[in-house]
Amino acid sequence: MRATLLERFGRRVRVAMVGGGIGSYIGETHAVALRADGLWDLVAGAFSRNPDTNAATGRSWLVPPERTYADHRALIAGESVRADRVDAVIVATRPSSHAEIACDLLAAGFHVISEKPLTDTAADARRVAAAVSESGRRLMLTHCYSGYPMVRQAREMVARGDLGRITLVESRFAGGMYAADTPPGSWRVDGTEGGVTALIADLGTHALHLAEFVAGRRITTVAADLARVAPEHVAFDNAYLTLRFENGARGRCWSTSQAAGATHGLAVTVHGDRGSVSWDHDTPETLWWRAAGEPDRLLTKAGPAATPAALAASRFTAGHPDGYALAFANLYRDFACALLSEALGEDPSPYLADLPDVADGVRTLAIVEAAVRSDAAGRPVTVDT
Amino acid sequence: MRATLLERFGRRVRVAMVGGGIGSYIGETHAVALRADGLWDLVAGAFSRNPDTNAATGRSWLVPPERTYADHRALIAGESVRADRVDAVIVATRPSSHAEIACDLLAAGFHVISEKPLTDTAADARRVAAAVSESGRRLMLTHCYSGYPMVRQAREMVARGDLGRITLVESRFAGGMYAADTPPGSWRVDGTEGGVTALIADLGTHALHLAEFVAGRRITTVAADLARVAPEHVAFDNAYLTLRFENGARGRCWSTSQAAGATHGLAVTVHGDRGSVSWDHDTPETLWWRAAGEPDRLLTKAGPAATPAALAASRFTAGHPDGYALAFANLYRDFACALLSEALGEDPSPYLADLPDVADGVRTLAIVEAAVRSDAAGRPVTVDT
Amino acid sequence: MRATLLERFGRRVRVAMVGGGIGSYIGETHAVALRADGLWDLVAGAFSRNPDTNAATGRSWLVPPERTYADHRALIAGESVRADRVDAVIVATRPSSHAEIACDLLAAGFHVISEKPLTDTAADARRVAAAVSESGRRLMLTHCYSGYPMVRQAREMVARGDLGRITLVESRFAGGMYAADTPPGSWRVDGTEGGVTALIADLGTHALHLAEFVAGRRITTVAADLARVAPEHVAFDNAYLTLRFENGARGRCWSTSQAAGATHGLAVTVHGDRGSVSWDHDTPETLWWRAAGEPDRLLTKAGPAATPAALAASRFTAGHPDGYALAFANLYRDFACALLSEALGEDPSPYLADLPDVADGVRTLAIVEAAVRSDAAGRPVTVDT
Amino acid sequence: MRATLLERFGRRVRVAMVGGGIGSYIGETHAVALRADGLWDLVAGAFSRNPDTNAATGRSWLVPPERTYADHRALIAGESVRADRVDAVIVATRPSSHAEIACDLLAAGFHVISEKPLTDTAADARRVAAAVSESGRRLMLTHCYSGYPMVRQAREMVARGDLGRITLVESRFAGGMYAADTPPGSWRVDGTEGGVTALIADLGTHALHLAEFVAGRRITTVAADLARVAPEHVAFDNAYLTLRFENGARGRCWSTSQAAGATHGLAVTVHGDRGSVSWDHDTPETLWWRAAGEPDRLLTKAGPAATPAALAASRFTAGHPDGYALAFANLYRDFACALLSEALGEDPSPYLADLPDVADGVRTLAIVEAAVRSDAAGRPVTVDT
């Protein structure tokens, strides 16, 4: 079906990248992810504000010099007049610049693939959401962990009722990156970018998205305890959130850079009254399914009991891990299929069902801001949606 | 040294049990634990208010009929006049009866081994604490999980500074015992015993004690979110606590019977700015030691890097798990040694250093009550100590 | 039922120990195991050939001086004339002395609890087997790992056909105790005790027994590759065995002291054509049950899917590990119940069904000797039974 | 450096595929792997002997119809006369056709990327080795698991002496694919392809390569026990191999399709006299490093203690699994860099150091054939190299 879409469209989807120059980890990650299925061609970019880095990045990816632009405005200007203009643009810059770049790209008619968090404030996020609406273009937010087969399986098991009534939701992104020391230039905590919520928005939106994605319901109320565990940090480096969800479920979300010793620290568990599913990014190819009154089952991607969503998200047989790159690639694959479907006059919605979008970006930032209000007030507050 | 104490004293410590009759899980558990090291003789008891159960329990343990008493008062009366009277009495009844029984026993000059929670209210707990003081007798509270070698090692590693400055403490006792259904007679949630905090005191005091025991510092402030996840429950069945500790550390504690699918659910992790230790009762013979910037180490009881506390608490070589019985037995062993030392005119304090006592009982119940106040008020409250 | 046996008999089973003096790890292990269920009284012994150690050991266990004997002959002489003579004697000396001691005890009418390996040669083992027959007494061989609830569950699952036709059996006791260096006095490899098979009999008989115990069938043919991996070792320190079992199953068994880094190294997996069970002593409270075409299940002792054998062998609820002491204690408990039943004129066989006995001792040593013959001949050989 | 090679060469390496048509798992796997780093363009192929499948596969990958050839001969004929002819050809057909296709391609001047096993007999494998020599072209054998960062780290740790003297090597590829039932068309066991060694060559060469790759030494002697565990299988479905390596190390290798319940089953452990490394494809992003006398360390890809080889083989930070696709991609990346270096007149050898080649293909098949001889003779035999 994907192959058919590509074949009928006759070419790959063309994409440019803003940011992501050599030395930026995120650029190479997107490049690997978008290549995996042969559905995208990276043919243009404004990779860095540093002209040398920009040019070197373009050369390294075989992007022609004339499509290696100085900045996103030049990219818009240059691409808009080409017959082979790019269809979509990846925004892989710092969060505080996302809103302007995304709005400009959408206004110019490009689809947008935005790194998360969508922006650095909920207000800006709402501005981007409005731009999406007005433009009629699509925005995919790269909450990449939702692309793992077993995360999608967990979501599907919840949705189809395997767990019964959903009761309790635990999520965390609890790393230790700045626990022992904080290297110079750590913008997530040094106050130079994104304000006091830079870190907890960066980590927290992943954990909050994961909780809502798997639990299949929205967070409505937050009670927060925010801290600067390392006294030298300007931004909060630890956020304990106690949550209420739609339909009565409760939960917790922990985002931190101070969990010394953690390898990665992203995980989610959803409990229902008939069992629980538990996924941990340290072992992402498996999912614990603990049905009440039955032995624990270790589900594997593409193994027995794999759901349709898991099978669709995996390229290999059981025992062959897809890994992070192909989890991320699932977002690119689904988004490509959605764009190709639409271009062919077909319904893109099946490809969009699991993709994080601008609404997720707005909501997760609203929760982060609710957490700040709650922490200041010393009481639970309602998420402003 | 232990052998020497026993040899010099010339006999085992004599103990009776109140409660714990046949069919009560806890009685057999204490019996196994106290036998393990050959330091105790169980020679008397008032095992059940049901005369048949009481007699049958006595016979099954070879307790003579004349020392199988109708209730704790008869036991006190009978034992007090014997030359071979028991030295100590185990209180293994329901929490609401602990205070009266313990106070009576202490007043009559017996040492007390009390099941946890110490009582069902902090006020009663303080009454027992006063009785301990007045009697000059000792009370050991069986927070049995603190007897595991690797729990004691974790505490020791924190205390000697391996983790650096202690920053974040996670603990939980998150089981699923009443998630899918609640059997008739579940006093922890049906409101017949211990009020609305019966369950969260039963589970929560273990998790709170473990947090304080390993972290080596006291909880001072609590922000709680309490729930009746199963609508039919009278008592709270889920407690999310966000905590502040002495010396600035923060943490969380989760107590629940609604974590469907959990095997046991007791665990503790302490983070410092130089690393973390993580212990889980599902794999109790090991301890993850994650030093910042170093590979994760899986420490084993009696293996390389075992601390003196771990070695002292283990009877076997590495790879031979002590298990729950010997963890529990460590409490009995230490308490016996303390009583023997004292009887021989020696300093018992080395044997008391790791033993949960009446102060732990008071404090953990005070935290539970603070949680109730916090939940009602919708704001953090100070623990009343 | 056990309680009833004890109650009806009116006293505990009386036992003495030969060997196991202070400083010997094995003595304390037996002492803990036999105390656990309150079915035995250790009242006599010949704990050491060193008089001081012997006396000190007796005192430490409150064994009266008059029942602390110089050697097993004195013990036989002393106990035989007492009204309260011991019922059984534990043989916890070096393997090369087992045969003589066991034969003497049996001839004097004592039941025997023998440490493994039964002796150091198959010929001596057969001599003990004959002595058991002639005496009408019982001998229990302490292959203690077979007492774990999940080992017994594995055996039961195989026996009742859950795995289908049994095809492949893997077992190992692959430790690293002498990999990096060999401490002075290491009799298992220095040639001073038990000849060239001292180590592989010590470890190998455990692994071979476990394979036969769980698979429920006997080993018939062995192809062996034996080595002295550490050049200074006199005894073999590594044994690779390729096996054939009755009924066509095949398998392997690996015994070594050269697996550097191993914690313990005992494990067994049995495959049938419908699934496999896998048990590892590093995580002894669980059993992986992998049914073909179904998700892996992690079975826990006393949890859902626990078999009658597992439940009977566990004293605690799921999540409360029995550990090594109570696995060992299960052998003592079953043996006590068998002796009590017999003394009460009842059928002891239910209590003997899972207990390692003299025949196991003969057969595992015959396999070890077959391995030596195979290694020398460079071809598979039949086990001489 | 890789970027520089590509940039200086000015284009990607062009590749065709023989076999791998739609419905063949292996074709899509190679396609994903070769795309990952943007170093290859798949531009031609003879994907299937079925014309419809062949055409559909070409279209699905946007390969032009004129470069979608009927078979490998047509491909050679067509590509040889093009200015933009492919540089290399992937051979992804059944093993029995590899030799002819590879020899033809090499003779025509194409580099070859061959699926494993290299051929179905050692004699044919030697024929291919000769063709490589004569052609001056390169052949990479896709023992893809050797591309995992932690497999390469294990090899590097062995090579640099971390483990001390290498003593014992365990490897296995023990799956359960045909344990419960054998689907029609299972050529690995039904005798239609590759003779009696079809399965044990398919699985066994992976396990044997992995053992030699990590241990850094060659297998010299084999004692084998081969079986048809499922009576209906024509080919052997279970192979137990006891091995001797150069320099005195010993080991075992187990290849089977009868390990019911296994997820994947590939694993390797190497012991030295100072410690061991253990890798299991079920958890491929980690490596257990067990130094004698030190706590077990769980090494993670790109985490603390990552070696240069591991870092070079990983694209993401610690905690972000590369997975199977990027392990496979590492082979493609290294091979592309070797070809680009050579084309630019530079030394390709650094890129070839870890790549499986034709000699590995010859040797692993020679070991499989030695196993057949050993099994028939009932004694160990020397590998014929």
Image (cartoon, coloured by chain):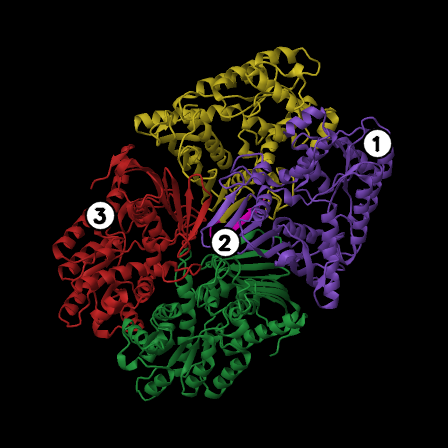
Chain colours: A purple, B green, C red, D yellow
Can you say which quadrant of the picture contains the C terminus of chain C?
top left
Amino acid found under the numbered disc labelled 3: Val
Give the labeled residue for mark 2: D295
Res A176 quadrant in image? bottom right
Amino acid found under the numbered disc labelled 1: Glu
Res A182 quadrant in image? bottom right
Amino acid found under the numbered disc labelled 2: Pro
Q: Are marks 2 and 1 in contact (CB under 8 Å)?
A: no
A33, above or below D318, in the image: above
Res B185 quadrant in image? bottom left
Give the labeled residue for mark 1: A79
Position of residue C152 measured from the top left corner of the image (x, y, whole percent): 33, 52
User: In this picture, which residue range is highlighted in magenta?
Assistant: D291-300
For the image, the number of numbered tags is 3
Give the labeled residue for mark 3: C362
Q: What number is the disc on residue B34? A: none
Alpha-carbon span between mark 2 and mark 1: 58 Å
Indicate the chain on which mark 3 is placed.
C
Position of residue A374 measured from the top left corner of the image (x, y, whole percent): 72, 64
Regarding mark 2 in the picture, which secondary structure is present there? loop
